[in-house]
Image (spheres, grey):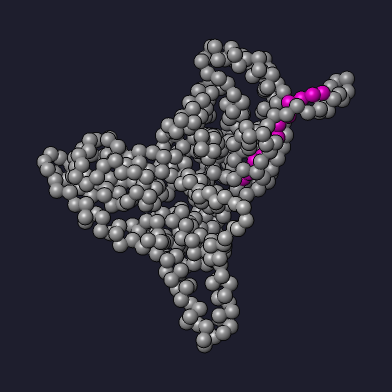
Amino acid sequence: MSVVDLIMPKMGESIMEATVLKWHKQPGDAVKMDETVLEIATDKVDSEVPSTAAGTIVEILFKENDVVPIGTVIARIQSGDGAVTPAPQQAAAPLAQAAPAVTAAPVATAAPVVSGTTGGNRFYSPLVLNIAAKEGIGMTELENIPGTGNEGRVTKKDILTYVSNRGAAPAVIAAPAPAAATVAAPVATTPAPATTNPGGNVEIVEMDRMRKLIAEHMVRSKSTSPHVTSFTECDVTNLVQWRDKNKNAFLKQYGEKITFTPIFIEAIVNCIKKFPMINSSIDGDRIIIKKDINIGMATALPSGNLIVPVIKNAEVKNLLGIVKDVNGLANAARINKLKVDDTQGGTFTLTNVGTFGSLMGTPIINQPQVAILAVGSIKKRPMVLETPQGDVIAIRQMMYLSLSYDHRIVDGSLGASFLTAVANELEAFDPNRSI
């Protein structure tokens, strides 16, 4: 018999850790190959982790609600036949020593919980950000904390050491050096906002787990990428008229409803082929240009949170193939049946703010991508049209587009050119196109 380590699986390029939601097995329980051992959650999706061997669970290394880096051993399985004596007490002992103010003690020994340094900015794990928030440490102060992790990253041990010394600093230096106490005073008052009483007639609602993860993901994105947003508008009258004319026939022929989203994705893919730098990511000083075009589409969950399932290899699919993927992923999201793989590998993201009635938006980049396109609601407006007989005013179906991009590698000329190309692609939609 041999012991097999169960590893926290890698669940996407930008996902560095996951939260243990529920253990389905305990030490001493038998487990089959591919049988669910536990449920985990990331800022993208909840998922189940199957067993990689048949045997008996002999050790569980993390508790529920612990945050665990990918690649970390989370449990051990004794494979083969025969009874095995479980060791739950030995497994639980390290967990019992965890400081109650910290989310997950085992993370302290795992340095690779954050991504590499890019463009002078450091990534911070949600655990480090949570500790910083609880201790009232702002991003400016966090940037100045020395890191002992790979490439100078701040680990949990680093920030806890800093917090400990930070709290003791005024007592040590106040007497001999009053001036130093003056410098330290603003730091001492920083935690105040975390305990401020809102007062008045208010209702306080705790963020749910996914909202916390989304918030951390958005903060990291804004601190990582210098965001620039460009805007344009396009006349989608031909597109709207084609869909109105063909949607019933499309449903009857293919058994699929056709929305505007697949048509937008088709146009985006065609333009990415012309501007491949939009379909890239940054790794230190290197630009990684992706050959596969995997389009993420922001989708609302029943809870109101957003998730981004991914249409894989959209560059090789026709409109019908994209329609099937869009409908399948959207339906799975609505009933919370998305798989981990459904949210992995995105290279560019589309978000339809028009679904909620907005004319336009300034979306936040979905890391580690470098651009995201927002489409607004389609509205009828009077527009000036040029005709051989002269200019005329006509009622047209108009839509605003906005592109947020990472200015480290996407310059204004490239961002604006790509955005204009998408608008031109939509305006040139063939109203006589067959289904």
**Image point (59%, 12%), residue name:** 249
Q: Quadrant of residue 111?
A: bottom left
Look at the picture and state if 353 lies above or below 64. above
Look at the picture and state if 148 lies above or below 345. below
Q: Quadrant of residue 155?
A: bottom left
User: Is residue 13 left or right of 183 when viewed as pictured?
Assistant: left
**Image point (22%, 46%), residue name:** 27
Q: How many marks?
A: 0
Q: List the single residue furthest toward the front.
A: 201
User: Is residue 288 left or right of 29 when viewed as pictured?
Assistant: right
Q: List the single residue furthest toward the right.
A: 390
Looking at the rendered image, the quarter that the N terminus falls into is top left
Q: Main secondary structure of the magenta part?
A: strand
Look at the picture and state if 234 lies above or below 113. above
Magenta segment: 394-405
Q: Who is closer to the viewer here, 301 or 351?
A: 301
Q: Quadrant of residue 396?
A: top right
Q: List the single residue furthest toward the left.
A: 82
Looking at the rendered image, the quarter that the C terminus falls into is top right
Residue 278, how many percent across, how many down?
Answer: 59, 40
Residue 20, how many percent across, how many down?
Answer: 36, 47
Q: Who is closer to the viewer here, 57 or 314?
A: 57
Residue 301, how many percent across, how many down?
Answer: 51, 35
**Image point (33%, 57%), residue name:** 106
Q: Who is closer to the viewer here, 210 or 123?
A: 210
Q: Is residue 268 magenta?
A: no
**Image point (48%, 57%), residue name:** 129
Could one spot residue 209 in this view of the protein? Answer: yes
